Image (cartoon, helix red, strand yellow):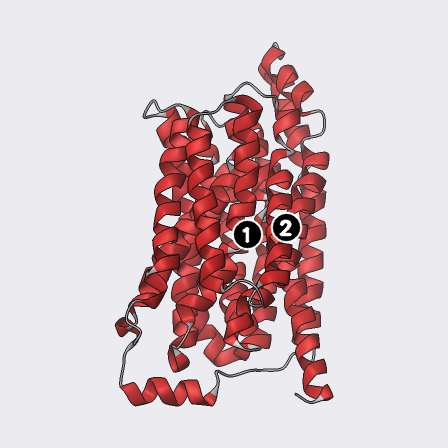
Amino acid sequence: MTAQGSNRRGYAILIIGILFFAFGFITWLNSTLIPFLKLVCELKTTTQAFFVTSAFYMAYFFLALPSARILRVTGYKRGMALGLAVMAIGSMLFIPASNDRSFPLFLTGLFIQASGLALLQTASNPYISILGPIESAAKRISIMGICNKVAGILSPLILGAIVLKDAEGIENNLKTATDAATKEQLLAELSQRIVTPYIVIAIALAALAVWIYFSALPEINEPEEAKTASAATGKTIGQFPHLWLGVLCLFLYVGVEVLAGDAIGPFGTSLGMSLQVTKNFTPMTLAAMLVGYIIGVFTIPKYLSQHAALKYSAILGVVLSIGILFSSGYLAIALIILMGLANALMWPAIFPLAIDGLGRFTAIASAFLIMAIVGGAVIPPLYAYLHEKAGFSTQAAFATCSFPAYLYILYYSIRGYKAGKA
């Protein structure tokens, strides 16, 4: 590769890294929004509060395929800028939602935010995969994951420090409020805490959209030999079983990743821990993921293949799920935090394994994989339902959701990714 080509690739990786930082910052705010909105909007159950994850991750299901069509028209760069602009609009909806303490309006803002993210993810994941050899795609995605999880560690800490400051005192004041007017005033003051952070987020996203639009980010295409190969076989996208097994794999992976990251707080609360303590659990989980990404950068593909990394990660997830079932208190919390380590290398491995050899179908296949992010809208609320409505202990509900998912991911890492290949 020439020095100029290397510089262009480095510049592209820098820009995509900044975008992955933005993904992480916005996505992992949900862990703080769940307890915050439960208080502000006076939600009765944790199951209702988990509509935050449902509204957010459901957008990926509905917007991924339209995003692929949009990208064919706009190209990667303008599509990314458009996605950031849509996210900024969703962030601004938090202002009227806060003024009215309207849970449906908060959910609408989250859905619009995630719609922009769906467009960004549909562009950026195949972009970073194709930007170099497919064999080292997991390494590049691991680098992106570091950017994502550093932001994910920071965002709940920053937002939590602002909106959940003196969380235990707030809960006590609301419980002891003697009249409706006093309670209403407390809730109104608490609700206003969210306004300034989301104004800042909207401005930052809009500025980033302008920068991306006018940047020198290069457009890329799938390798010509890959296009020719897939065209010569006469295959359709439905004839790549490793892709469709990968879509299910990604659905389950995102579900357990969001479960470990966003449900750990309510999990701790159900065990009697205070909100002041549990608000710090998500950053700990993401810190464990960060360690996993760093391991991936240094080991893939030099010492560890993508499918081997996925296999060992899935085995760790299975073991941790069993451990959570038979543990309690801070030991159970520690095991969930370690799930961050188990989850770290799954996305970097699953995505390139699923799109390997698809050639001209890569863009549409990426859209289907992005649709699978809807797993984050399904599995965490299922956990809350099993605990609150079906009578499962919080440990049993958690293990019921995570154990089968990790077993399937293990299957994909051993046989599924090879399905249909010669």
* Label total for image: 2
Left or right: where does residue 407 sit relative to residue 172? Answer: left
Pick the front one: 14 or 119: 14
Report if residue 59 is visible in the image.
no
Percent x, y for residue 357? 39, 77
Indicate left or right for 106 with 214 as reference: left
Label 2 to label 1: alpha-carbon separation: 7 Å
The residue indicated by pointer 1 is 344
Residue kind at label 2, given as amino acid type: Leu
Residue at horizontal 48%, vertical 28%? 43
Q: Secondary structure at mark 2?
A: helix
Q: Is residue 273 depicted above or below 411 in this figure?
A: above
Query: According to the image, label 2 marks what residue?
Result: 290
- How far across and down, in percent of the image, does residue 144 sit? 62, 62
- Which of the 4 image quadrants contains residue 235? bottom left
What amino acid type should be assigned to the residue bearing mark 1?
Ala
**Mark 2 closeness class: few <14, some 14–19, many ≥20 residues within 10 Å:** many
